[in-house]
Amino acid sequence: MERWQRRVLVTLGTLVVMMAVLAVGLVIRNALGSSGLTGRTEPSPGASSDNGAQNPTLATTSAETRPQQTQPTATPAPTTSTSTLPPPPAPFVEDAVRAVDLRLQPEGLGPIPFGTAVNRTITVLTGALGSPDTDSGWLPANVEQLQCPGARARRVTWGSLSVFFSDGPTDWGPNLHEHFFSFVYSLPDGASSPDGASLRTSEGLQLGVTLARSSSIYGESSITRAHSTRGTFLEVDVPGPGYLLGIFTGPNDEDRLVSLVGGTGCGP
């Protein structure tokens, strides 16, 4: 064999060996890469970097484009429509009044002014004095035992105290308005003290006191002595509607007060 032929054969053999070595290396590299033993981790598609500071553009883009999750809206439970009736009115509660609270005044009986409704007047007086002794009921106002203003009148008594009601008109109530408008407080014939509760005026005047005592309380100008038709009496007037009349047994200082009439009064 010629020398140049030998060189060609050696060169070809070397090339074949090198190609074989390269082929084996590629096979080994692929095998190691598929088993994860190469020491490198390839990022998965769509995965963000492990540190937002190392890749700020990617982090910002992900936060801005990520869709916001919305909380489910709670559906309110259906309400049942019911008609609510208004509460019943509170019962009227009358303040407690005692007999000592009652005052014989030109405007009424202490806490009970003239013009007060009939039922309320009777309720308060019953609480203070007990059940009434008599009640005439509603009668024509012109009957002999009443002779009061209005079309109808009524008289209710507690011992020596009588209260009168009218359907008006009076100084304290219009026509057809039933109301308290007068009282009479009198000693029984021959008695020195009243029946039932002992009442007095706001100034302290009581039945049975002398004319001299009455004059010292209200002034001599309030006393009319020996009137031709009315005898001797005391008059207490007020600027507004109201009137108080006292009747004495005579014109002398020692004569006694036997009756007090408040309001319009009844009778001829």
Image (cartoon, helix red, strand yellow):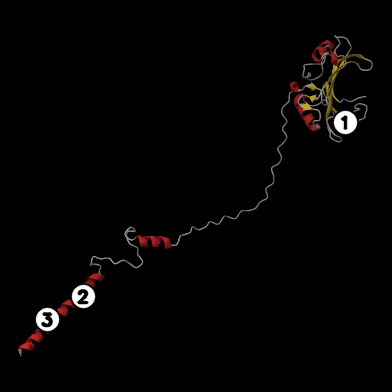
Give the residue at mark 2: 26
Q: Which quarter of the figure has residue 86?
A: top right
Q: Secondary structure at mark 1?
A: strand
Q: Is residue 212 visible?
A: yes
The CA distance from mark 1 to mark 3 is: 151 Å
Above or below residue 260? Residue 251 is above
Asked if disc 1 and disc 3 are in contact, CB closer than 8 Å, the reply is no
Q: Position of residue 241 (x, y in %)?
A: 83, 26
Q: Mark 1 or mark 3, which is nearer to you?
A: 3
Asked if disc 3 and disc 2 are in contact, CB closer than 8 Å, the reply is no
Give the quadrant of the C terminus. Answer: top right
Q: Position of residue 128 (x, y in %)?
A: 75, 25
Give the left or right position of residue 93, taking residue 33 as reference. right
Q: Mark 1 or mark 2, which is nearer to you?
A: 2
Give the left or right position of residue 105, taking residue 67 as reference. right
Mark seen at residue 14: 3
**Residue type of the residue flagged with mark 2:** Leu
Among all residues in the image, which is located at the extreme front?
57
Give the quadrant of the N terminus. Answer: bottom left
Mark seen at residue 153: 1
The CA distance from mark 3 to mark 2 is: 19 Å
Give the left or right position of residue 39, taking residue 148 as reference. left
Q: Position of residue 104 (x, y in %)?
A: 80, 21
Q: Residues within 10 Å of mark 3 (few under 14, many from 20)?
A: few
Q: Residue at x 81, y 32 (%)?
A: 118
Mark seen at residue 206: none
Q: Position of residue 112 (x, y in %)?
A: 77, 27
